[in-house]
Amino acid sequence: LLDVPESLRSTIMAHLPAKDLVAAERTHRELLDDTRRYAMDTVRQKYAERRLPLADLAQDEPVTWWSDWADGVTLGPLGIQPPSPTRTSRDPKKLRAPPNGFWMRELWAWENAVQVPSEEYATVQDAAGAAPPGAHVLVAAGMHVVPQTLVINKRLQLLGEASADGSPLTTIKGQNLQQNHSVVRAAHGGRVGLCGIAVWCYASDSLRRSSVSVDAGGHLYARQVGVKCVSGRYSAGVQVHEGGHLLMHTCSVRCCTGSGVIIFGSGTLQGTTLCDNWFNGVEIQKRGSGGRGSLTDCHIHSNGYSNNEDDLGSGVTVFGEGCEANLRRCAVHSNKGGGVLVHSGAKGALQNCQITMNHAGFEFGDVDVDTSSEVVLDECECRGNGEHGREQYRVLAVQDQSKLTLRNCTVRCQAGAFGTGIEVQRGASLDVSHSKIHGCTGSGMLLRDEDTKATIHHSILEDNDLHGLEVQAGSITVDAQTHVANNKVHNIYISGTNGECQTNIDFEGAPIFRDFVSTKS
C-alpha cells in the first residue's frame, strides 16, 4: 500500500487487522482481496443510503464506455490503472471494468466527497468548483436554482437523492439563462457523471436553450436522471456537440419545447424514455463528420405536434451524410410526424424494434427512408394507422435513391383507406426476405416509378384490402417461395400506369399467384 494516496491508505488500514498486514503468510493477493471487499461494501452502503443505483456500471456488467470515462485515480501496486483507449476493445462482451479499479476509484471519490448545501458550500457551483477531480458532489434533496451555467471541465460526479421508487428528489433548475446556454455543461476535458438528479430549464421568453450540453472533448454519463426544458421554441433537453460524448442509462427526457436529445457527436442511450417533446424524441444531425447514436431498450413516444394539416416531429430523426443510428429492442409509437425518419445520406439499423401507431401524413410513414439513405430492419414489427384514420398512409416509405432492407419483419397498415404497407418510389430500392405484409387497407406493397426496383424472397403478402403487390412502374423480382394470396382485389397487379414495368416473377409456386392481372409487363 506504500504508493496508495495517503488519504485512501489510512482509510484502508483503519479497517484491516494490523496483524494481517504484517503476517508472513499474508499474500499480496489476499491483501488485495480484503481491500477490494472493504471498498465494495463501503461503496454499496453509501449508494444505498441515498437510494441510488451504483452510479457507474457495476463490477461484472459490460462497460462500453470505460476507455472514455475512467481516467480517474492511479493506485500504484494495486494494479487498477484504467486501460488505455488504444488497447480497449469496443465489443461490449469483451470490455469489462477492472473490478479492483472500479471499487477503489469509487471509494476514493466518496472519501473526498463534498456536500451541498453545507457550511463550506452553499451552492452547487461552489461545491463543484472546490471538489478535487474524481470526487463526488453530494447534492441534497430539494430544488437548487442556478443563475448561470454550471460548467464542469474535470472528472466529477454529481449525486442526488432518490425516493423509494427511484425518482430523483434532487433538482437542479436553471432559470432565465442566456441564449444557447444550458443548465449543466460538460466542457472540454470534463468527465461528468449525473445520478439521481433532475435537470430542468425554465424561461418565459423565446430564447433557445438546453438543460444539458456536452462540448467537443467533453463526456457526460447520466443514470437515473430526469430532464425537462421549457424555454423558447426548439430548446432541447440534451445537446451533444460535435466531438462530444453522451451515455444515458435509465433516464427520462420529456416536455422539451424542441427535441428531447440532439446529437452532433456521439450518444448512447440505454433504457431511457423520451416522450412529450414538441419536436423529435431523438435527433441525430450532421455537423462535421456526422452524429452517431445508439439506442437500446428505449421507449420513444408522443413526440411532435400538429400544425393545421401537417404533423411535425418524429420519434427518431437521422439527417445528413455520415450520420448513423442503431436501435435495438426499442418501442417507438404515437409520434406525430413519423416513427423513424432517415434522410439525406444517413444510415440506420433497427433490430427487434416495435415501430407502431405513429401519426404521419402522406409524406412520411412509420419508417421513412429518403434521399440516398440506407436502412436495415431486422425482426421488427411495423404497424401504422395514420392520425385519426387518415387515408393514403404508408407504414414504410423508401424514395429518392434510397435503399430499404427488411429481414424477418411484419408490416401492417390500418389507415382509414388506401393505406399501403411498403411504398417504393423515385429511384429507390427494396429488398424483403422472410417477412409478412398483411392487413393493409390498401396494397401490401406498391412500386410507383420506372427507376424503382424491389426483390422479394420467402415472404408473405396476404389479406390486404386492395392488392398484395401493385406495380405502377419499375422492376420487381419475386421468388417461388413467396406466398401472395387472399388479397381482396388482386394478388399481383402490374398496371404500368406510371411507366415501363419489368417483372421477374417465378411461377413455379403456383397456384399461390391467383388473380394475376397485368396491363403492361
Image (spheres, rainbow, N blue to C red):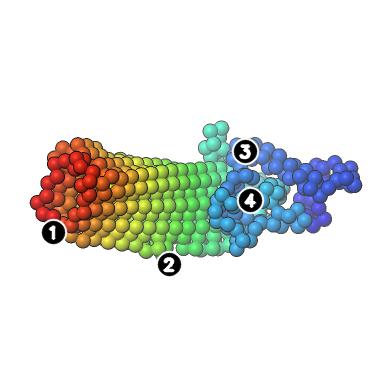
Question: Height in image: 295 above or below 52?
Answer: below
Q: Foreground residue, 378 or 46?
A: 378
The answer to which of marks 4 and 1 sits earlier in the sequence is: 4
Residue 300's x, y, as percent? 39, 44
Q: Which residue is mark 2?
A: 288
Q: Amino acid at mark 4?
A: Ala
Question: Based on the displayed image, in which of its 4 quarters is residue 420 positioned?
Answer: top left
Question: What secondary structure is marked by label 2?
Answer: loop
Residue 145's x, y, as percent? 52, 48
Q: Amino acid at mark 1?
A: Gly
Q: Indicate left or right for 490 with 14 as reference.
A: left
Give the distance between the C-alpha atoms of the residues marked 1 and 2, in whole angstroms: 40 Å
The answer to which of marks 1 and 2 sits earlier in the sequence is: 2
> Among all residues in the image, which is located at the extreme left?
519
User: Given this view, does label 1 or label 3 mark the residue nearer the observer?
Assistant: 1
Q: Which residue is mark 1?
A: 499
Give the distance between the C-alpha atoms of the residues marked 4 and 1, in whole angstroms: 60 Å
Q: Which residue is mark 3?
A: 50
Q: Which residue is mark 4?
A: 97
